[in-house]
Image (cartoon, rainbow, N blue to C red):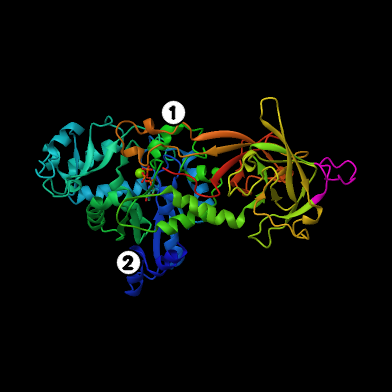
């Protein structure tokens, strides 16, 4: 994987090739890109790839990136989304040069429309949407001209002003570009530029009752901002012709559009509209539910910005749509968390071990009742520091780290068998205590005082090392274990409603016992629970109740 990554890093992606060529030819001395979200939902992992691409290019080449809110649809947009988008981009580690809003250009865009009317290149159409659809033609049949197409410039100017001034009802008129009703590109058959919508806008309030369509706002906003490379996803390929036509006719800055493939990952959905349904219909607890593929969900789940950027780098830029395996995202999380996560010992399904020959040192009121061990926080990080954990004659180990009748290759605890307790001593299982029903309730073991970790002079060799906690000071915590949100790879393309494919068992809540160092955990901390996985504190923790999210297991244990 590492090798392949290096190989990929050496070759340029197609956008980098274009930009290097543009810089070499002197077409530009620096470049301008933009990230243009519509503030109608929270950003998801697909957006992260667009963010990494747009901001990444201007980190690599001279120039800058703008953040532009594409807020031309008053009905679905909200300032809550604006704030969350800004927060997510910053969290990912990027900064924009300017924060712009397409709605700030409404006056300019109106002027552009008037200019087109003056040039005889736009007209007001009274057709209903059904009538327009009927005249649009098909891919093989040319469309027909609307009867309103021949209106004079003067009449069009008056009617368009009337539209703006609120003289007409929603849907009763539109402004259309006058291009070619027989064009092979259906989007060039007199596309709608403006529609009437008497709706409150989150920034412009009630000033406007006409709103520009996507195609008449996007490219124009790019031009207004002197964007050199306007990068969007493949579904906009057919729009490029209109994008160029409008720029040419309006004689404005010649921004250029380039398309790359949308990034979708399996076992989830990446569409704000669908994610919104999951939120409003209560399938998840919110946009930041740790099962959501949103940036805010991934963040709460314990993903780091570094791991998400690494993921976006590795999947790179493609020209063909494909589904990326969520396993790669998890791989990237493990790679980074292994470097930064503090190690803690946590036992999930405990069985008690009594160390019968352990002489409790007399250390007064120490609740732990034993000695204090100094343990490295992170063997991967020389600056990771140490923590203290206590040892006593009563400890807890995982139930499945003991087997009464072990198989041949079982190197964990079994009657007569020895194991090392991580960072402490080697113990040997002498006796198994059961209740009346035959269930193992306690293991009586002896320990070897000369086998202290780091100073082992016992000469005993063992193959198994177990994590453990001191039964006398362990802290009970809640752990939320997450699974795929959907049972199928691509719920959106399955028959019926995508929500029929939701995995009902995507959340499992368990309790566990942690070493007391866990008490100082903060939301920003990342942990590896030894032999288990990576975890982080959840914001629901309160009043002394510690709740942890499992980010990923230690190894890829999931199989389709
Ligand atoms: P959604 O369908 O989730 O609403 P969108 O494309 O409508 O997505 P926008 O807010 O318009 O969302 O997107 C902002 C930018 O992010 C656009 O340039 C868009 O092309 C890009 N983008 C959105 N989804 C993806 C994705 N899955 N992969 C790559 N880029 C994406
Ligand atoms: Mg959109």
Residue 100 visible from this viewpoint:
no
Spot occupied by residue 145 in the image (x, y as percentages of width and height): 11, 41
Residue 151 coordinates in the image, percent (x, y) = 14, 41
Residue 503 coordinates in the image, percent (x, y): 44, 34
Q: CA distance from mark 2 to mark 1?
A: 44 Å
- Name of the residue lying farthest toward the top: 436
* Closer to viewer: mark 2 or mark 1: 1
> Is residue 364 located in the magenta-colored stretch of the structure?
yes
In the image, residue 271 lies in the stretch drawn in magenta: no
Circle 1 residue: 281
Q: Which is more toward the observer, 160 or 368?
A: 368
On the rendered structure, is 516 left or right of 25? right
Q: Nearer the viewer, residue 128 or 149?
A: 128
Using the image, determine if residue 100 lies above or below residue 510: below
Disc 2: which residue? 18
Q: Secondary structure at mark 2?
A: helix
For residue 491, side relative to residue 516 (left or right):
left
């Amino acid at each position: 994987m590492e090798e392949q990554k290096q190989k990929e890093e050496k070759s340029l992606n197609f956008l980098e090739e274009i930009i290097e060529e543009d810089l070499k030819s002197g077409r530009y001395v620096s470049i301008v890109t933009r990230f243009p979200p519509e503030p109608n939902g929270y950003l998801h992992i697909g957006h992260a790839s667009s963010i990494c691409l747009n901001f990444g290019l201007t980190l690599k080449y001279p120039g800058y990136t703008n953040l532009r809110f594409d807020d031309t649809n008053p009905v679905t947009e909200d300032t809550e989304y604006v704030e969350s988008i800004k927060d997510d981009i910053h969290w990912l580690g990027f900064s924009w040069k300017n924060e712009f809003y397409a709605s700030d250009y409404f006056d300019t865009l109106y002027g552009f429309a008037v200019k087109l009317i003056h040039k005889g290149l736009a007209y007001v159409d009274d057709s209903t949407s059904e009538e327009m659809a009927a005249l649009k033609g098909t891919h093989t049949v040319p469309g027909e001209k609307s009867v309103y197409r021949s209106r004079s410039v003067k009449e069009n100017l008056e009617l368009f002003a009337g539209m703006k001034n609120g003289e007409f009802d929603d849907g009763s008129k539109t402004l259309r570009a006058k291009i070619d009703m027989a064009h092979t590109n259906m989007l060039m058959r007199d596309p709608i530029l403006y529609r009437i919508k008497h709706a409150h806008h989150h920034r412009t309030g009630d000033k406007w009752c006409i709103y520009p369509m996507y195609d008449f706002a996007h490219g124009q906003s790019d031009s207004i901002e002197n964007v050199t490379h306007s990068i969007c996803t493949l579904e906009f390929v057919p729009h490029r012709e209109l994008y160029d036509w409008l720029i040419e006719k309006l004689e404005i800055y010649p921004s250029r559009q380039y398309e790359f493939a949308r990034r979708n990952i399996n076992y989830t959905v990446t569409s704000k509209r669908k994610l919104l349904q999951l939120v409003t219909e209560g399938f998840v607890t919110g946009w930041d539910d740790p099962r959501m593929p949103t940036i805010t969900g991934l963040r709460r789940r314990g993903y780091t910005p570094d791991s998400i950027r690494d993921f976006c780098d590795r999947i790179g830029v493609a020209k063909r749509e494909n589904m990326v395996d969520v396993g790669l995202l998890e791989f990237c999380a493990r790679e980074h968390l292994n470097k930064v996560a503090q190690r803690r010992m946590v036992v999930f399904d405990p069985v008690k071990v009594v160390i019968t020959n352990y002489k409790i040192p007399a250390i007064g009121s120490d609740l732990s009742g034993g000695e204090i061990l100094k343990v490295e926080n992170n063997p991967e990080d020389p600056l990771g520091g140490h923590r203290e954990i206590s040892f006593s004659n009563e400890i807890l180990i995982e139930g499945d780290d003991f087997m009464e009748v072990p198989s041949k290759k079982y190197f964990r605890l079994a009657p007569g068998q020895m194991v090392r307790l991580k960072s402490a001593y080697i113990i040997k299982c002498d006796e198994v205590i059961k209740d009346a029903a035959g269930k193992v309730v306690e293991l009586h073991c002896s320990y070897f005082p000369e086998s202290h970790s780091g100073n082992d002079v016992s000469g005993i060799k063992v193959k198994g090392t177990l994590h453990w906690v001191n039964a006398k000071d362990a802290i009970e915590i809640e752990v939320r274990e997450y699974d795929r949100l959907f049972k199928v790879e691509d719920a959106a393309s399955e028959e019926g409603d995508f929500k029929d494919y939701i995995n009902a068992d995507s959340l499992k809540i368990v309790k566990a016992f942690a070493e007391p160092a866990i008490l100082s955990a903060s939301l920003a901390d990342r942990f590896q629970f030894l032999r288990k996985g990576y975890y982080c504190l959840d914001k629901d923790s309160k009043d002394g109740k510690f709740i942890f999210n499992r980010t990923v297991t230690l190894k890829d244990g999931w199989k389709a």
